[in-house]
Image (cartoon, rainbow, N blue to C red):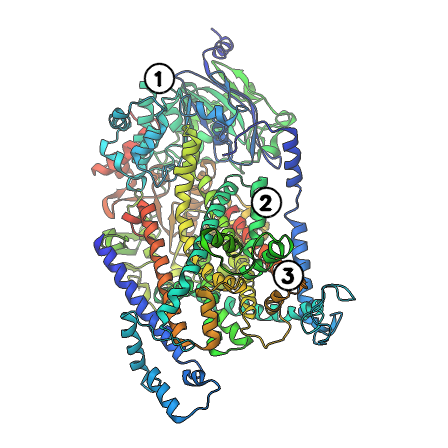
Amino acid sequence: MTGLQEREDLTTAENLLSVSGLTIRTGDGRTLVREVSLELRRGETLGIVGESGSGKSLTARAITGLLPRGLEASGGAVLDSISTLDAPESRLRKIRGRKVALLMQDPFTMLNPLQTAGTHIIESLPKGAIKRGAVGAEIERRLSEVGLAADVAERYPFQLSGGMRQRLATACALAGDPELLIADEPTTALDVTTQSEVLNLLREIQAERHMALILITHDLGVAFSVCDRIQVMYAGSTVEEGPAQALVKTAGHPYTVGLKRAEPPFRHYAPELSTIPGRVPSADSVWKQCAFAARCSWVSDQCLEERPSLQPVGDMRRTACVRIDEIDEELQAEMGIIAQEGKLPDIGAAQPLLEISDLEKSYRVSPLLGRTRTVPALKGVSFGLRTGEALGLVGETGSGKSTIARLLLGLTSAESGRIILGDLDLSSYKSLSGRERREARRRIQMVFQDPYSSLNPARTIGGTLSEVLQISGRRKIGTSVADLLTQVGLPADYASRLPSGLSGGERQRVAIARALTLEPDLLICDEPVAALDVSAQAQVLELLRDLRARHQMAMLFITHDLAVVRQVAERLIVLRHGEVVESGSVEQVLEAPQHLYTKKLVQAVQQTRGEGD
Amino acid sequence: MTPEVPRSAIGRGFRRYIAKIPRGALVNTLCIAVIGAVVICAILGEVIAPYDPRAQDPLRGVSPPGDGHLLGTDVLGRDVLSLLIAGARSAVVGPVVVALGCGLIGGLLGLLGAYYGGTLDAAVNRLADLIYALPSIIVAIVVVGVMDGGYWSVAAVLTFLSLAYQIRIIRSVTMAQMSLPYVEAAKTSGLSDTRTILAHILPNIVPTVLATLLLDFVTAMIGYAALAFLGIGIPPGAPNWGAMIATGQTYIFINPWLSVAPAILLILTATCVTLLGDQLHEAAGRKAAIR
Amino acid sequence: MVVFLAKRLASLIAVLFIVSILIFSLLALSPGSIVSTLIGTRPATPELIAALEERYRVNDPYPVQYWHWLTNAFQGDLGHSVRTGEPVVSVIASRLPLTLQLGAYALILVVAVGIPLGMLAGMRRGRPVDRITSTVAIVAMSAPAFAVAILLIWVFGVWLEWLPVYGAGDGFFGRVYHLTLPAVSLAVAMAAVLHRQTRAATMHVMDQDYVTFARSRGVSRMRILIRYALRNTSLPIVTSAGVILIVALSGAVLVERVFALQGVGTLMIESVDYNDLPVVQGLAMLLALLIIIINQLVDLLALVIDPRTRMRGRS
């Protein structure tokens, strides 16, 4: 059977959902999603993969008739012979929950804060399906399906952890026994270990119920580990579509190659992180050409002539790359390069730079009812850092990793413990003289997590940088804002722009440039790539590695992502609930974890990336 | 929550008609025009009034519009329109002083409280809580009334009573900025506190500061008028909108304009300023949301 | 829970105590002695002055005066009106019912108009309902109660002659009939503010993920309206309702004056005009008590509405 015939079989009555030519526009006429089509059989799992701005979430929202206010969808979406794009709200309300349910990204905002878990499930059950007396048993059954204990029913969302909330939300979404579950980045807001648990849960439930599932994610690995078929979206349109097994091995579109390569490897150090140059364009700016053309290394004139449509290639695959026949071999060769292994560059002999011992810090919580409690954030943390060394600080939410950064910068103060930086005692910023404080802040600089708020929106890039340049005294020796920008790979004319005119990755470069202006001995990076898309992530990581080598500065790299830390750090500290549970060289810790928690972390990463088992 | 019901053609036409009601530019222009007119009256006053607002004609007394008097005359035979124009000054000057005064004091307290935190912040916060719990006009009536205070003591009392709103708003927007990493980044770059406040926090809260100033102005204007309505804080017989509303009430059957006109003028001016303040507030919110 | 209530009660009494000192000292320091007010145009013989000074204890040291006033206040004696010689408590008691009726009437109007329209506007953002009610609300918000009162008198009393423009009326229906214009004047600005607060809160809630998630599960419209929108908006609404009520107290004073209603508000203005300090002090204490109760009720309601405030600290 050829691929084409198979395709035709797919589009027959077996289809639970078929979307064709779906286009989503804003009220003022901008196009966000253009002519996206997808098909899904009963019991099938489809992964929609793309970076932010690809339109993957909007596509899901449109299918359920839940587009945000001000957006309009056209085209067709037929779910079990009901057209969802033009059905009236009253009709949609009847199929939502029963035919299709949507599970959203953030478990912290998805549940009604004033309602208990049990009530959430009751209200989601179809009316009249359960007899009054059986409600309690039904709730228990529903909770146990998602792995929650019966006593959770009495609790409010704020009393549950992120993972438990996502499980509860899943139970709610499944309460109407839908034939299709759309999960929109269901694990992105969760910790690594919880992520793999929730993904496993989704996998199990899907198999058990034989329910169709659309999993929307930015992470190809996650999609591979759960889905039968994958659809890759870019700038509002589909660039490639095919079976997951095929996509794991080969790529049908240069963007897919870029996406796969940009993901930092977890198992080894990659001497060269591959990046996709440039940034994601708006759907409107590329509607008459291949959307990826501007960032593609195989671009030719025919890519710019017209908007490519999906063409079948090989077994059941379709791609929007017009040159696929010519460049196929090169693409597959490119895929292989990812596996290239390397060794961390040696930093040579080094002096001790920073010594932290027995740091303790706690926060006070005073509820309206009951007595004030103190919640420990750090319970006696000690570690050291040598000049030029890069230390990874790994931990999940609440591990206290960001508190350490804030203590080092004097943004908060510790109850006890010592922080010694060379000849400066930073244990208490308050007792430092003005000169010492300035000196400390020159020697320690920080790159913050969120590039969207770490730059003053009211000041130009040049204004932000020249202000720090002034303090550094480097202006006298002829350093200019342009030099600073070039150093981080940005054009000098960016100085006149406001942060709002820059992409996330570019803003993070500016933030790095600002931190480096003072030529610090220690650069603290607090999740510097967590808020960025994979393609921008690799760019920033590459830049950080390069700058560290050039400036011989030490780096404290705080992250939750083991693959990222593998690419930048020599040594690793694993934090949990404010305590160091394991430390050692990166290879040692990640390849032969000793502590139970570290083992769990490593296992979780392997599972979510589909590298486990 | 927007059911997609097919709309009838008539419904659609009506909706379009409503949708065309201009909310942006035209409304703003109108507001600025009204405020401009009031300000001009406040500055020029007697100069542009058709009659001398002090010229009495006891024999004429209260009369309805006509006879060269567009809005009639009051009990002393004075021209109502001229009184209105002359009254703009006392309606505007005091509130402007109050708005600026409490903008400066309250703004500074809110900003510094939020920036430095600790005891200063706690004290500022307590002050705001306390003032918030005061029914301002009643307190003003009692304090100014019992003390027999004049126009400027009203300004002092109203300034104090408006501090709460100013402090809370500025404090909360400053706190919001403080929680953003760029302020921490500025601090950790070694910038001085003064520089951090002036160069980083202030530019981002200016729209909010302006909006609160305008709303403070409205509150003060209403407060002033209410006190004048009760005969507090202004010399008897002086041209004043609030006082005109009170004295005109007696003659509402003979010449309603005597109290209706200043009432409309008061509401109109207050509305225009509120509208502008509201737009500024929304613009500030949008700017924050775009980031 | 008991500890919590006891703490609240203790702080309440402490605040009331401080307020009483403030009120007493502020008024005691006012210019113009009570004695000269009392004497008025009578010839000021030394005997008369001495007798009045004795009766009003003006020569006692200030703390002693305060102590007398406080101990008497505890026994329900706030002194005697300088103007009429009646006990302050009974003067206030005779005026209070009318004011309370006016307030209740206005409050019903405010809640009945402000909240539903605000929710409607919040859910139909940008639609005609929202545009019209929001524009009206801005105008209404900027309109002081006494100015609105004058306009209403002009339109409904003078022009249309539908409703009475002064006096309180007799019997239940007479009262309602007479209090309609005053209550509406008082309600306009409050309803506008409540409309805006409700609208903002509703818009915020309707934009939340949990509403979208509920819709995606096919939860009924009514349930989303009540259990999601109304319950989650009630917290900010209740909080703002406290502030609105306090502002409304001021409005009531002026509205009573416009409509010549013999309520507590007019009593206050008359007493201030006459320098009738004992009455002003009594009214001020009553007002302080009222405000403290309003604030405590708001806090308690917040506890009842939101489980998070019950079990976790407010940050």
The residue under label 1 is which amino acid type? His
Write down the chain letter for disc 2: C
Q: Same subunit under labels 2 and 1?
A: no
Residues at circles 2 and 1 in contact by the CB criterion of under 8 Å: no
Marking on residue A210 = 1
Left or right: residue C270 versus residue C149 is left
The residue under label 3 is which amino acid type? Val
Q: Secondary structure at mark 2?
A: helix
- x then y, percent, for residue A111: 36, 37
Q: Same subunit under labels 2 and 3?
A: no
- x then y, percent, for residue A175: 34, 25
Give the spatial CA distance, label 2 vs label 1.
Answer: 51 Å
- x then y, percent, for residue C253: 48, 64
Q: Secondary structure at mark 1?
A: loop
Question: Camera-side residue: B144 or C283?
Answer: C283
Give the spatial CA distance, label 3 vs label 1.
Answer: 74 Å
Q: Residue furthest bottom?
A: C46
Give the spatial CA distance, label 2 vs label 3.
Answer: 24 Å
Examine the image and state in which quarter residue C19 appears.
bottom left
Residue receiving disc 2: C132
Q: Secondary structure at mark 3?
A: helix
Question: Camera-side residue: A40 or A320?
Answer: A40
Q: Which mark is nearer the camera, 3 or 1?
A: 3
Residue receiving disc 3: B260
Label 1 crowd (10 A; few <14 / some 14-19 / many >=20) = some
Picture layout, residue A39 above or below residue C180: above
